Image (spheres, rainbow, N blue to C red):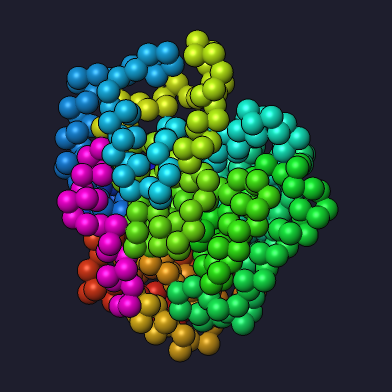
Protein backbone atom coordinates (compact mmCIF):
# COMPACT_ATOMS: atom_id res chain seq x y z
CA UNK A 1 0.00 0.00 0.00
CA UNK A 2 1.51 3.35 -0.97
CA UNK A 3 1.67 6.00 1.72
CA UNK A 4 -0.56 8.49 -0.19
CA UNK A 5 -3.47 6.07 -0.19
CA UNK A 6 -3.56 6.28 3.61
CA UNK A 7 -4.12 10.03 3.69
CA UNK A 8 -7.90 10.31 3.91
CA UNK A 9 -8.44 8.29 7.09
CA UNK A 10 -7.72 10.50 10.12
CA UNK A 11 -6.77 7.80 12.57
CA UNK A 12 -7.92 7.89 16.20
CA UNK A 13 -5.39 8.12 19.06
CA UNK A 14 -2.57 7.74 16.55
CA UNK A 15 0.44 9.79 15.53
CA UNK A 16 -0.95 9.88 11.98
CA UNK A 17 2.17 11.07 10.14
CA UNK A 18 4.46 8.67 11.99
CA UNK A 19 2.10 5.76 11.33
CA UNK A 20 1.62 6.58 7.67
CA UNK A 21 5.36 6.73 7.09
CA UNK A 22 5.68 3.09 8.21
CA UNK A 23 2.16 1.61 8.47
CA UNK A 24 1.47 -1.36 10.67
CA UNK A 25 -1.42 -3.00 8.83
CA UNK A 26 -3.36 -6.09 9.87
CA UNK A 27 -5.39 -7.83 7.19
CA UNK A 28 -6.86 -10.99 8.72
CA UNK A 29 -6.98 -12.91 11.99
CA UNK A 30 -7.58 -16.36 13.38
CA UNK A 31 -7.31 -17.75 16.89
CA UNK A 32 -4.36 -16.09 18.66
CA UNK A 33 -2.86 -14.59 15.51
CA UNK A 34 -3.26 -11.62 13.23
CA UNK A 35 -1.85 -11.63 9.72
CA UNK A 36 0.01 -8.48 8.68
CA UNK A 37 -0.18 -7.07 5.14
CA UNK A 38 3.35 -8.38 4.49
CA UNK A 39 2.18 -11.91 5.31
CA UNK A 40 3.54 -12.38 8.83
CA UNK A 41 1.63 -14.12 11.65
CA UNK A 42 1.48 -11.76 14.62
CA UNK A 43 0.77 -13.19 18.07
CA UNK A 44 -1.97 -11.04 19.61
CA UNK A 45 -0.92 -9.97 23.10
CA UNK A 46 -3.67 -7.39 23.44
CA UNK A 47 -6.92 -9.04 22.29
CA UNK A 48 -6.97 -6.30 19.66
CA UNK A 49 -7.79 -3.46 22.01
CA UNK A 50 -8.95 -5.51 25.02
CA UNK A 51 -11.83 -6.82 22.86
CA UNK A 52 -11.38 -10.29 21.39
CA UNK A 53 -11.45 -12.30 24.61
CA UNK A 54 -12.52 -15.47 22.76
CA UNK A 55 -9.79 -15.16 20.13
CA UNK A 56 -10.16 -14.20 16.48
CA UNK A 57 -12.17 -15.55 13.60
CA UNK A 58 -14.86 -17.26 15.63
CA UNK A 59 -17.23 -18.70 13.04
CA UNK A 60 -20.07 -19.00 15.55
CA UNK A 61 -20.06 -15.20 15.72
CA UNK A 62 -19.63 -14.50 12.02
CA UNK A 63 -22.38 -16.99 11.12
CA UNK A 64 -24.76 -15.49 13.69
CA UNK A 65 -24.06 -12.01 12.32
CA UNK A 66 -24.56 -13.06 8.72
CA UNK A 67 -27.82 -14.88 9.50
CA UNK A 68 -29.13 -11.93 11.47
CA UNK A 69 -28.43 -9.38 8.74
CA UNK A 70 -30.45 -11.49 6.34
CA UNK A 71 -33.29 -12.04 8.75
CA UNK A 72 -33.70 -8.62 10.35
CA UNK A 73 -31.09 -6.02 9.46
CA UNK A 74 -32.46 -3.27 11.64
CA UNK A 75 -35.45 -2.55 13.79
CA UNK A 76 -35.94 0.39 16.11
CA UNK A 77 -35.95 0.01 19.86
CA UNK A 78 -37.66 3.37 20.52
CA UNK A 79 -41.31 2.48 21.20
CA UNK A 80 -40.77 -0.66 19.09
CA UNK A 81 -38.81 -3.80 19.75
CA UNK A 82 -37.43 -7.03 18.43
CA UNK A 83 -36.60 -10.15 20.43
CA UNK A 84 -32.79 -10.16 20.49
CA UNK A 85 -31.87 -7.45 23.01
CA UNK A 86 -34.49 -8.83 25.41
CA UNK A 87 -32.97 -12.29 25.14
CA UNK A 88 -29.44 -10.90 25.42
CA UNK A 89 -30.20 -8.80 28.51
CA UNK A 90 -31.85 -11.78 30.18
CA UNK A 91 -28.80 -13.93 29.54
CA UNK A 92 -26.26 -11.28 30.50
CA UNK A 93 -27.74 -10.62 33.92
CA UNK A 94 -27.10 -14.26 34.86
CA UNK A 95 -23.41 -13.26 34.97
CA UNK A 96 -23.67 -9.84 36.60
CA UNK A 97 -23.35 -9.34 40.35
CA UNK A 98 -26.36 -9.92 42.57
CA UNK A 99 -29.17 -7.43 42.13
CA UNK A 100 -27.98 -6.05 38.77
CA UNK A 101 -30.84 -7.32 36.68
CA UNK A 102 -31.32 -4.52 34.16
CA UNK A 103 -29.28 -3.63 31.09
CA UNK A 104 -29.22 -0.51 28.89
CA UNK A 105 -27.56 -1.06 25.51
CA UNK A 106 -25.16 1.37 23.82
CA UNK A 107 -22.64 1.15 20.97
CA UNK A 108 -19.32 1.71 22.72
CA UNK A 109 -17.56 2.11 26.04
CA UNK A 110 -17.74 5.89 25.79
CA UNK A 111 -21.49 5.76 25.32
CA UNK A 112 -21.80 3.30 28.19
CA UNK A 113 -19.98 5.74 30.47
CA UNK A 114 -22.08 8.74 29.49
CA UNK A 115 -25.21 6.62 29.84
CA UNK A 116 -24.15 5.56 33.35
CA UNK A 117 -23.46 9.14 34.43
CA UNK A 118 -26.82 10.30 33.08
CA UNK A 119 -28.67 7.43 34.77
CA UNK A 120 -26.95 8.34 38.07
CA UNK A 121 -28.00 11.99 37.81
CA UNK A 122 -31.55 11.17 36.73
CA UNK A 123 -31.87 8.55 39.47
CA UNK A 124 -31.26 11.06 42.24
CA UNK A 125 -33.70 13.45 40.59
CA UNK A 126 -36.31 10.69 40.38
CA UNK A 127 -35.81 10.08 44.12
CA UNK A 128 -36.37 13.75 44.86
CA UNK A 129 -32.68 14.45 45.55
CA UNK A 130 -32.11 16.91 42.73
CA UNK A 131 -29.15 18.59 44.45
CA UNK A 132 -27.07 15.43 44.01
CA UNK A 133 -25.34 16.46 40.80
CA UNK A 134 -21.59 16.32 41.46
CA UNK A 135 -19.59 13.54 39.83
CA UNK A 136 -16.31 12.19 41.13
CA UNK A 137 -13.73 10.45 38.97
CA UNK A 138 -10.07 9.73 39.61
CA UNK A 139 -6.68 10.82 38.34
CA UNK A 140 -5.44 8.50 35.56
CA UNK A 141 -9.00 7.30 34.95
CA UNK A 142 -10.01 6.64 31.35
CA UNK A 143 -13.71 6.62 30.68
CA UNK A 144 -13.80 7.01 26.94
CA UNK A 145 -13.81 10.17 24.89
CA UNK A 146 -17.28 11.69 25.07
CA UNK A 147 -17.79 14.85 27.12
CA UNK A 148 -19.05 13.07 30.23
CA UNK A 149 -16.28 10.51 30.09
CA UNK A 150 -13.46 13.02 29.64
CA UNK A 151 -14.90 15.20 32.41
CA UNK A 152 -14.69 12.40 34.98
CA UNK A 153 -11.57 10.98 33.33
CA UNK A 154 -8.20 11.87 34.73
CA UNK A 155 -5.83 11.89 31.75
CA UNK A 156 -4.61 15.40 30.96
CA UNK A 157 -4.16 15.00 27.21
CA UNK A 158 -7.70 13.71 26.82
CA UNK A 159 -9.10 16.81 28.54
CA UNK A 160 -6.95 19.83 27.99
CA UNK A 161 -7.80 20.55 24.35
CA UNK A 162 -11.55 20.41 24.75
CA UNK A 163 -12.79 23.40 26.68
CA UNK A 164 -14.33 23.60 30.10
CA UNK A 165 -16.02 20.16 30.12
CA UNK A 166 -18.72 19.29 32.69
CA UNK A 167 -18.72 21.47 35.76
CA UNK A 168 -19.10 20.04 39.26
CA UNK A 169 -16.58 17.25 38.79
CA UNK A 170 -13.81 16.30 41.21
CA UNK A 171 -11.10 13.68 41.00
CA UNK A 172 -9.76 11.34 43.64
CA UNK A 173 -6.03 10.94 43.57
CA UNK A 174 -4.40 8.10 41.67
CA UNK A 175 -4.58 4.99 43.83
CA UNK A 176 -0.97 3.92 43.71
CA UNK A 177 2.00 4.31 45.99
CA UNK A 178 5.68 3.61 45.20
CA UNK A 179 5.87 0.82 47.82
CA UNK A 180 3.65 -1.19 45.46
CA UNK A 181 6.35 -1.47 42.80
CA UNK A 182 6.69 -5.07 41.49
CA UNK A 183 3.56 -6.18 43.33
CA UNK A 184 1.96 -9.39 42.21
CA UNK A 185 -1.82 -9.21 41.94
CA UNK A 186 -3.54 -6.59 44.07
CA UNK A 187 -0.94 -4.47 45.89
CA UNK A 188 -0.72 -4.22 49.67
CA UNK A 189 -0.40 -0.47 50.10
CA UNK A 190 -2.78 2.41 49.56
CA UNK A 191 -6.16 1.45 51.04
CA UNK A 192 -6.10 4.75 52.95
CA UNK A 193 -6.28 6.67 49.65
CA UNK A 194 -10.00 5.87 49.57
CA UNK A 195 -10.47 8.12 52.61
CA UNK A 196 -10.02 11.10 50.33
CA UNK A 197 -13.63 10.53 49.32
CA UNK A 198 -14.62 11.39 52.88
CA UNK A 199 -12.74 14.68 52.55
CA UNK A 200 -14.66 15.48 49.38
CA UNK A 201 -17.92 14.68 51.13
CA UNK A 202 -16.87 17.04 53.94
CA UNK A 203 -16.10 19.73 51.42
CA UNK A 204 -19.13 19.48 49.14
CA UNK A 205 -21.74 17.72 51.26
CA UNK A 206 -23.04 14.25 50.43
CA UNK A 207 -26.35 15.88 49.45
CA UNK A 208 -24.56 17.37 46.43
CA UNK A 209 -22.71 14.28 45.17
CA UNK A 210 -24.36 11.90 42.70
CA UNK A 211 -21.77 9.29 41.87
CA UNK A 212 -18.18 8.08 41.96
CA UNK A 213 -16.80 6.36 38.87
CA UNK A 214 -13.61 4.29 38.80
CA UNK A 215 -12.11 1.53 36.73
CA UNK A 216 -11.57 -1.48 39.01
CA UNK A 217 -8.29 -1.95 37.12
CA UNK A 218 -6.94 1.23 35.53
CA UNK A 219 -6.31 0.40 31.87
CA UNK A 220 -5.35 3.17 29.47
CA UNK A 221 -3.95 5.27 32.33
CA UNK A 222 -1.08 2.78 32.63
CA UNK A 223 -2.53 -0.47 34.05
CA UNK A 224 -2.71 -0.16 37.83
CA UNK A 225 -4.43 -2.61 40.13
CA UNK A 226 -6.43 -1.29 43.07
CA UNK A 227 -4.79 -1.60 46.49
CA UNK A 228 -6.28 -4.42 48.56
CA UNK A 229 -9.38 -3.17 50.32
CA UNK A 230 -9.51 0.13 48.40
CA UNK A 231 -12.61 -0.64 46.34
CA UNK A 232 -14.33 -2.10 49.42
CA UNK A 233 -13.69 1.14 51.25
CA UNK A 234 -15.07 3.22 48.35
CA UNK A 235 -18.13 0.99 48.46
CA UNK A 236 -18.62 1.54 52.19
CA UNK A 237 -18.27 5.31 51.96
CA UNK A 238 -20.55 5.65 48.93
CA UNK A 239 -23.21 3.41 50.51
CA UNK A 240 -23.16 5.41 53.74
CA UNK A 241 -23.69 8.64 51.82
CA UNK A 242 -26.26 7.64 49.18
CA UNK A 243 -23.67 8.15 46.44
CA UNK A 244 -23.80 5.73 43.52
CA UNK A 245 -20.67 3.72 42.80
CA UNK A 246 -19.99 3.09 39.10
CA UNK A 247 -17.40 0.55 37.99
CA UNK A 248 -16.18 1.15 34.46
CA UNK A 249 -15.56 -2.43 33.35
CA UNK A 250 -15.11 -1.72 29.66
CA UNK A 251 -11.80 -3.60 29.76
CA UNK A 252 -12.29 -5.83 32.79
CA UNK A 253 -15.73 -7.10 31.79
CA UNK A 254 -16.26 -10.51 30.17
CA UNK A 255 -13.55 -12.56 31.80
CA UNK A 256 -10.43 -10.39 31.75
CA UNK A 257 -9.57 -10.98 35.41
CA UNK A 258 -10.95 -14.50 35.81
CA UNK A 259 -14.62 -13.83 36.52
CA UNK A 260 -17.36 -12.38 34.34
CA UNK A 261 -16.74 -8.94 35.85
CA UNK A 262 -13.95 -7.62 38.08
CA UNK A 263 -16.67 -6.77 40.61
CA UNK A 264 -17.34 -10.50 41.04
CA UNK A 265 -13.71 -11.36 41.76
CA UNK A 266 -13.07 -8.35 43.93
CA UNK A 267 -16.18 -9.02 46.00
CA UNK A 268 -17.46 -5.47 45.64
CA UNK A 269 -20.87 -4.85 44.12
CA UNK A 270 -21.22 -1.40 42.61
CA UNK A 271 -24.53 0.22 41.64
CA UNK A 272 -23.76 0.50 37.94
CA UNK A 273 -21.31 -1.35 35.67
CA UNK A 274 -20.32 -0.09 32.22
CA UNK A 275 -19.14 -2.54 29.58
CA UNK A 276 -18.45 -2.84 25.82
CA UNK A 277 -15.53 -4.47 23.92
CA UNK A 278 -15.64 -8.14 24.99
CA UNK A 279 -19.45 -8.09 24.88
CA UNK A 280 -19.34 -8.99 21.18
CA UNK A 281 -15.73 -10.21 21.16
CA UNK A 282 -15.04 -6.94 19.35
CA UNK A 283 -16.83 -8.15 16.22
CA UNK A 284 -19.61 -5.56 16.16
CA UNK A 285 -19.67 -2.34 18.20
CA UNK A 286 -21.89 -2.67 21.26
CA UNK A 287 -21.91 -1.63 24.90
CA UNK A 288 -24.05 -2.56 27.88
CA UNK A 289 -24.72 -0.76 31.16
CA UNK A 290 -25.85 -2.90 34.09
CA UNK A 291 -27.84 -1.26 36.88
CA UNK A 292 -29.06 -2.36 40.25
CA UNK A 293 -32.77 -3.10 40.48
CA UNK A 294 -33.35 -0.24 42.91
CA UNK A 295 -32.05 2.25 40.34
CA UNK A 296 -34.17 0.87 37.52
CA UNK A 297 -37.23 0.65 39.77
CA UNK A 298 -36.88 4.27 40.86
CA UNK A 299 -37.69 5.26 37.26
CA UNK A 300 -40.76 3.03 37.05
CA UNK A 301 -43.02 4.91 39.42
CA UNK A 302 -44.61 7.64 37.25
CA UNK A 303 -47.52 7.39 34.81
CA UNK A 304 -47.06 4.33 32.59
CA UNK A 305 -47.53 6.23 29.33
CA UNK A 306 -44.59 8.55 30.05
CA UNK A 307 -41.06 7.75 28.85
CA UNK A 308 -39.04 7.04 32.00
CA UNK A 309 -35.55 7.93 30.75
CA UNK A 310 -35.03 10.44 27.96
CA UNK A 311 -31.91 8.76 26.68
CA UNK A 312 -30.95 6.19 24.07
CA UNK A 313 -29.23 5.60 20.74
CA UNK A 314 -30.68 4.64 17.36
CA UNK A 315 -28.61 1.50 17.63
CA UNK A 316 -29.30 0.61 21.29
CA UNK A 317 -29.90 -3.14 21.08
CA UNK A 318 -29.13 -3.33 17.35
CA UNK A 319 -30.19 -6.77 16.06
CA UNK A 320 -26.87 -7.60 14.42
CA UNK A 321 -24.85 -6.50 17.44
CA UNK A 322 -27.17 -8.43 19.74
CA UNK A 323 -26.75 -11.54 17.57
CA UNK A 324 -22.97 -11.14 17.80
CA UNK A 325 -23.20 -10.75 21.58
CA UNK A 326 -25.42 -13.81 21.98
CA UNK A 327 -23.02 -15.93 19.92
CA UNK A 328 -20.10 -14.54 21.94
CA UNK A 329 -21.83 -15.39 25.19
CA UNK A 330 -22.42 -18.94 23.92
CA UNK A 331 -18.68 -19.29 23.38
CA UNK A 332 -17.77 -17.80 26.78
CA UNK A 333 -20.16 -20.21 28.48
CA UNK A 334 -19.36 -23.32 26.40
CA UNK A 335 -15.60 -22.88 26.77
CA UNK A 336 -15.68 -21.61 30.38
CA UNK A 337 -13.64 -18.61 29.26
CA UNK A 338 -14.61 -16.49 32.26
CA UNK A 339 -12.52 -18.90 34.40
CA UNK A 340 -9.45 -18.88 32.17
CA UNK A 341 -7.66 -15.80 33.47
CA UNK A 342 -7.47 -17.28 36.97
CA UNK A 343 -6.32 -20.66 35.63
CA UNK A 344 -3.48 -18.99 33.71
CA UNK A 345 -2.68 -16.34 36.29
CA UNK A 346 0.28 -18.03 38.00
CA UNK A 347 1.99 -18.84 34.73
CA UNK A 348 1.30 -15.34 33.41
CA UNK A 349 2.62 -13.73 36.59
CA UNK A 350 5.80 -15.81 36.67
CA UNK A 351 6.54 -15.13 33.00
CA UNK A 352 5.93 -11.40 33.32
CA UNK A 353 7.99 -10.93 36.46
CA UNK A 354 10.94 -12.71 34.80
CA UNK A 355 11.46 -9.39 32.97
CA UNK A 356 12.44 -7.75 36.24
CA UNK A 357 16.06 -8.64 35.56
CA UNK A 358 16.40 -5.80 33.01
CA UNK A 359 17.64 -2.49 34.45
CA UNK A 360 15.36 -0.47 32.23
CA UNK A 361 12.31 -2.07 33.85
CA UNK A 362 10.87 0.15 36.56
CA UNK A 363 7.79 -1.83 37.54
CA UNK A 364 5.72 -4.88 36.62
CA UNK A 365 2.04 -5.24 37.46
CA UNK A 366 -0.37 -8.11 36.87
CA UNK A 367 -3.84 -9.41 37.73
CA UNK A 368 -5.94 -11.98 35.87
CA UNK A 369 -4.77 -11.87 32.25
CA UNK A 370 -3.72 -8.25 32.48
CA UNK A 371 -0.05 -7.33 32.61
CA UNK A 372 2.07 -4.22 32.44
CA UNK A 373 5.78 -3.60 32.20
CA UNK A 374 6.83 -0.03 32.90
CA UNK A 375 10.19 1.39 31.82
CA UNK A 376 12.28 4.09 33.39
CA UNK A 377 11.84 7.10 31.17
CA UNK A 378 14.47 7.50 28.45
CA UNK A 379 15.31 10.74 26.64
CA UNK A 380 11.67 11.49 25.91
CA UNK A 381 8.53 10.41 27.73
CA UNK A 382 7.01 7.42 25.95
CA UNK A 383 9.97 6.80 23.65
CA UNK A 384 10.96 3.49 25.24
CA UNK A 385 7.35 2.32 25.34
CA UNK A 386 6.86 3.08 21.66
CA UNK A 387 10.18 1.56 20.63
CA UNK A 388 9.44 -1.67 22.50
CA UNK A 389 5.99 -1.91 20.93
CA UNK A 390 7.33 -1.16 17.45
CA UNK A 391 10.18 -3.67 17.83
CA UNK A 392 7.71 -6.36 18.95
CA UNK A 393 5.56 -5.77 15.89
CA UNK A 394 8.31 -5.66 13.24
CA UNK A 395 10.97 -7.95 14.64
CA UNK A 396 9.24 -10.32 17.04
CA UNK A 397 5.85 -10.72 15.31
CA UNK A 398 3.93 -9.95 18.48
CA UNK A 399 1.36 -7.29 19.25
CA UNK A 400 1.66 -5.48 22.57
CA UNK A 401 0.36 -2.01 23.42
CA UNK A 402 2.20 1.04 24.64
CA UNK A 403 0.77 3.76 26.78
CA UNK A 404 3.56 6.17 27.58
CA UNK A 405 6.46 4.08 28.89
CA UNK A 406 4.17 1.25 29.92
CA UNK A 407 3.72 -1.85 27.81
CA UNK A 408 0.24 -3.21 28.44
CA UNK A 409 -0.79 -6.75 27.63
CA UNK A 410 -4.19 -8.40 27.70
CA UNK A 411 -4.14 -11.45 25.41
CA UNK A 412 -7.23 -13.36 24.32
CA UNK A 413 -8.34 -15.75 27.09
CA UNK A 414 -7.64 -18.72 24.79
CA UNK A 415 -3.87 -18.14 24.97
CA UNK A 416 -1.76 -21.23 25.82
CA UNK A 417 1.11 -21.32 28.31
CA UNK A 418 3.56 -21.71 25.42
CA UNK A 419 2.15 -18.65 23.73
CA UNK A 420 2.48 -16.71 26.99
CA UNK A 421 6.14 -17.69 27.09
CA UNK A 422 6.56 -16.66 23.45
CA UNK A 423 4.92 -13.29 24.06
CA UNK A 424 6.99 -12.49 27.12
CA UNK A 425 10.21 -13.69 25.46
CA UNK A 426 9.49 -11.35 22.54
CA UNK A 427 9.09 -8.43 24.92
CA UNK A 428 12.34 -9.43 26.62
CA UNK A 429 14.06 -9.26 23.23
CA UNK A 430 12.55 -5.84 22.62
CA UNK A 431 13.74 -4.65 26.05
CA UNK A 432 17.31 -5.67 25.21
CA UNK A 433 17.26 -3.17 22.34
CA UNK A 434 16.16 -0.18 24.45
N1 LIG B 1 -13.83 2.96 29.59
C1 LIG B 1 -12.70 2.26 29.68
C2 LIG B 1 -12.25 1.78 31.01
C3 LIG B 1 -11.96 1.96 28.54
O1 LIG B 1 -10.79 1.29 28.64
C4 LIG B 1 -12.44 2.40 27.30
C5 LIG B 1 -11.68 2.10 26.06
O2 LIG B 1 -10.58 1.63 26.08
C6 LIG B 1 -13.61 3.15 27.25
C7 LIG B 1 -14.30 3.40 28.41
C8 LIG B 1 -14.12 3.68 25.95
O3 LIG B 1 -14.56 2.68 25.12
P1 LIG B 1 -14.79 3.00 23.56
O4 LIG B 1 -13.46 3.23 22.96
O5 LIG B 1 -15.49 1.75 23.07
O6 LIG B 1 -15.68 4.18 23.47
Q: Position of residue 228 (x, y in %)?
A: 53, 72
Say which of 38 and 330 sits in front.
330
User: Can you give x and y, in whole percent of width and height, for residue 374 in the image?
Assistant: 53, 74
Please give left or right for residue 162 compared with residue 396 in the image: right
Relative height, residue 132 to residue 140 (above, below): above
Left or right position of 169 against 52: right
For the point 37% across and 13% down, which residue is it?
A: 80
Q: What is the quadrant of residue 45 in the picture?
A: bottom left
Within the image, what quadrant is residue 362 found in?
Answer: bottom right
In the depicted view, which residue is nearer to us: 67 or 214?
214
* Residue lying at 44% horizontally and 53% vertically, measured from the top left: 251
Segment tinted magenta in the rendering: 326-347
In the depicted structure, whether residue 282 falls above or below residue 311 = below
User: Which residue corresponds to the image point at 52% horizontal and 50% vertical from the top-left?
Assistant: 270
Q: Nearer the viewer, residue 163 or 177?
A: 177
State the residue lying farthest toward the top.
305
Q: Residue at x 63, y 49 (%)?
A: 212
* Prevalent SS, magenta region: helix
Q: Which residue, as the protein is rendered here, is positioned at the far right?
A: 203
Q: Is residue 21 left or right of residue 114?
A: left
Magenta region includes residue 27: no
Residue 376 at least partly seen: no
The mark total stands at 0
Horizontally, residue 167 falls left or right of residue 287, namely right
Residue 397 drawn at (x, y percent): 31, 65
Amino acid sequence: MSSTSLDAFWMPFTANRQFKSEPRLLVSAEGMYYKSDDGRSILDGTAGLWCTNAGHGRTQISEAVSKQIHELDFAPTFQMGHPLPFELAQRLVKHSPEGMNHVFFTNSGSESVDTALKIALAYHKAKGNGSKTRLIGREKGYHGTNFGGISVGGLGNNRRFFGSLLTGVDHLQHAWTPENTFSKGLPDHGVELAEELNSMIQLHGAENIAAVIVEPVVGSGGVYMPPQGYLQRLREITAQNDILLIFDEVITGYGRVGTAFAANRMGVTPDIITTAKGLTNGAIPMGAVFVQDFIHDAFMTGPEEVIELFHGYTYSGHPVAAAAALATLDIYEQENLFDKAIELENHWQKALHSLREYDVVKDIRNYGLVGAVEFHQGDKLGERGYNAFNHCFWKENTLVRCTGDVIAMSPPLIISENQIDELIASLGNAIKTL
